Image (cartoon, helix red, strand yellow):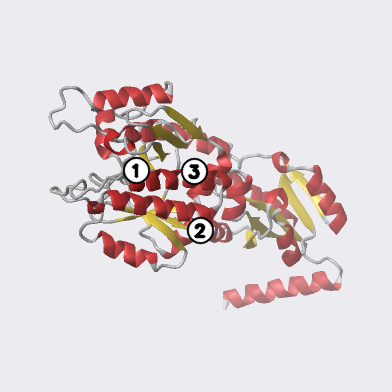
Amino acid sequence: MQINIEITANNAIKQMERRYGRMIKKVFVSGCYDLLHSGHVEFFRQAAKYGDLYVGIGSDETILHYKGHKTLYPEQERLFMVKAIRYVKDAYINQGSGILDFIPTLDIVKPDILVVNSDGASDAKRELCQKRGMEYIVLERTPHQGMEARSSTSLKASLSNREEEKEDIPTRLDLAGTWIDQPYVSCMAPGWAITISLLPTFEIRERCGLSTSTRNQIKRIWPFKLPHMDPEMLARLVFCFENSPEREDGIISGAQDAIGICIPGLCRHYYDNHFWPEKIETCNDERVLNWLESHLCMIPMEPRHANCNVTKGKDITKPKVQALAKAADECWRAILAMDLKAFATAYKASFEAQTALFPAMIQGEVQSYIDRYAECPGVMAWKMPGAGGGGYLALVVDDAPEFGRKHPEAIPLHIRRNQQ
């Protein structure tokens, strides 16, 4: 009964306001709200003093392309959290792009007032309000009484400092040219191997093709994080340490593992009948790295079994190695051009060249995983990391975040940047 009385009273107030020309105004604010904190809530509280508050939220795609990074929380989760705040009347995911991505939301809400923080004010927003006949209000960023000032930037810095206290040794994913770093392969035809250095944002399992043997050797020297030094020199040190002359098994680990782990971003290295590459080229263009992250993911499989021998039955011929080198060339060009179709074609061609050289890369249940995911909508190409035999299935997909929502088992990838 009390609820009905409150509703009736509210309706009566609104009727009186309509009668006397004092309609409740619609207030609009917009932002990312990825690291939602007390500063955001206080901003909503202050803005709601001017009327019913409506919130526009930056989409995952807009934040990725405008700010150059992925969101911590996907857009629907951010929408849910913002709507749950009692000062908010309703909220929407903005469908526009750039700094004025909220314009389509204005057409839905038709607000009377646009409220911004002082650090978010701009002439473009002021002119937009003048054009649409909206009031433009700028609020100073002030914390709620008794609370510390909060900002997303300061929170990210704090989280980054905490992460430094944890183990942070990266791993690597090879994209094309696997095996070319072995002289008994590159002696047939020289070529490039392409790798990306990955942040350890997921559990890195042993014997799964992500260079855990090299990573474990690194942790013997630097248990928690790589030292700050020239990445190529660091990779040389790791390669030499892992391949000690006293190594009992007589196996020389390929240089692509040390290079892929130690050199950040996207990297390609050229091999011509030697263990160490003749040249190394890198790409740290944010647009390219973001693009790769939006089209790559991994599916966990069973680890490579203990007695697995991926070199058994190898068939190394010049035409097959040339096909491997050609696919790596095409893969690199496609990535730099951000040509998804060409990338998927070259990625798949590289894997086919690898398995033609080393058929034992596909063992056990691997083919069943390939068959299953090859049929999934959005999957464009696939390969196994490293020497294969099991571990992970690395996929090229048309939309990695969307694929992850439909396939919770999919692991998103985060490429290590220069500053990390």
Q: Nearer the viewer, residue 113 or 230?
A: 230
Q: Nearer the viewer, residue 11 or 270?
A: 270
For marks 1 and 2, give the CA distance.
25 Å
Label 3 with label 1: CB-CB less than 8 Å: no
Residue at 34% across / 48% down in the picture?
320
Q: Label 2 belongs to which residue?
A: 399
Q: Label 3 belongs to which residue?
A: 332
Question: Where is residue 68, by image quadrant?
Answer: top right
At which x and y percent is residue 124? Answer: 80, 46
As drawn, is 61 to the left or to the right of 397? right
For marks 2 and 3, give the CA distance.
20 Å
Q: Amino acid at mark 2?
A: Asp
At which x and y percent is residue 105? Answer: 71, 62
| Secondary structure of the residue carrying numbered label 2 | loop
Report whether residue 153 is seen: yes
As drawn, is 260 to the left or to the right of 249? right
Closer to the eye: label 1 or 2: 1
Return the disc, 2 or 3, that comes first in the chain's sequence: 3
Residue at 47% across / 47% down in the picture?
331
Closer to the eye: label 2 or 3: 3
Residue at 50% across / 48% down in the picture?
292
Question: Where is residue 97, by image quadrant?
Answer: bottom right
Label 2 with label 3: CB-CB less than 8 Å: no
For marks 3 and 1, give the CA distance.
14 Å
| Secondary structure of the residue carrying numbered label 3 | helix
Report whether residue 175 is seen: no
As drawn, is 380 to the left or to the right of 368? right
Residue at 56% across / 45% down in the picture?
38
| Secondary structure of the residue carrying numbered label 1 | loop
Q: Label 1 belongs to which residue?
A: 178
How busy is the neighbourhood of tag 2: few (under 14 within 10 Å), some, or many (20 plus)? some
